[in-house]
Amino acid sequence: MAGIGRVYEMGGLRVVDLSKWIYPERSARPCNLRRFKQEDTQDYHTMIEGMESHLGTHVETPYHLTDDGADILHTPVTQFMGRGVRLMLDVGPNDLINTAAYTNAASAIGIRRDDIVILDSPWHSPPFEPRAEDYRPRLTQALAEACAADHIKALGFGEGINIESDNVTSLVIHQTLFEQNILLIEVIEGLQCLKDDVFFFCAQPMPIAGLDSCCVRAFAIEGLPGFTAGD
């Protein structure tokens, strides 16, 4: 079986895998695979049984909170890809991320309408894995409102952002963003492998009707014309 890595070369472009790699036997969220051989065709198939829609790196749509919102299938395919911007926030351990931390980082790069913004900080800890030394800064409603005001189309989170410790605030943040049809991309890994802060980003889910969220293979392409800091 071929090995996997974070960074690849393709036609002179640099491709970085930003997905959480999922090993079903070690996954905290359900991902049960059953491989079997078809007797008539003599090939192998795999049953995916009881897989959690919020598994690994995943994208969330407005259907996550309301029956009236668009689900995965009815979200335009272009909303899952575009100009990606990584913002390394200047925040301290366990800080509440205020508007200034976001706007300072955003203005340094230049956020555009329909960007996919990915937040990170120096205080890394794996999400949804409680540990004593977790110093990740926490999200705020003010941050969500600032992102919505910039009319981005998706907001993602690296391992330096706490997205799960405050359910009340998390709900408000989801509501604020979903009301503007801004998607959420959670559990992004490998941001430290990026050389650039602006890149082409893609996180395509499976086209299944009725899914509020879906596991994705997220990646960045650095150096693609039209998707660099100078363009």
Image (cartoon, helix red, strand yellow):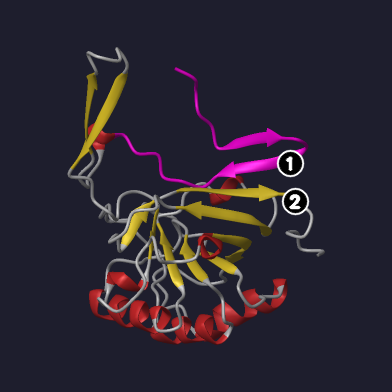
Q: Say which residue label 2 marks.
A: 224
Mark 1: few/some/many CA within 10 Å (<14, 14-19, 20+): few
Residue in front for this viewpoint, 40 or 57: 40
Predominant SS of the magenta segment: loop
Please name the residue shown 48% across and 64% down the image: 156
> Which region shows up in magenta?
1-23
Disc number placed over residue 13 in the picture, else none: 1
Q: Amino acid at mark 2?
A: Leu
Q: Amino acid at mark 1?
A: Leu
Residue 125 at what x, y percent from top left? 39, 54
Q: Secondary structure at mark 1?
A: strand
Please name the residue shown 77% across and 60% down the image: 226
Residue in front for this viewpoint, 125 or 79: 79
Residue in front for this viewpoint, 97 or 3: 3
CB atoms of marks 2 and 1 within 8 Å: yes
Residue 112 at what x, y percent from top left? 67, 76
Whichever of labels 2 and 1 marks the residue nearer the N terminus, that label is: 1
Mark 2: few/some/many CA within 10 Å (<14, 14-19, 20+): some
Whether 219 is drawn above or below 165: the answer is above
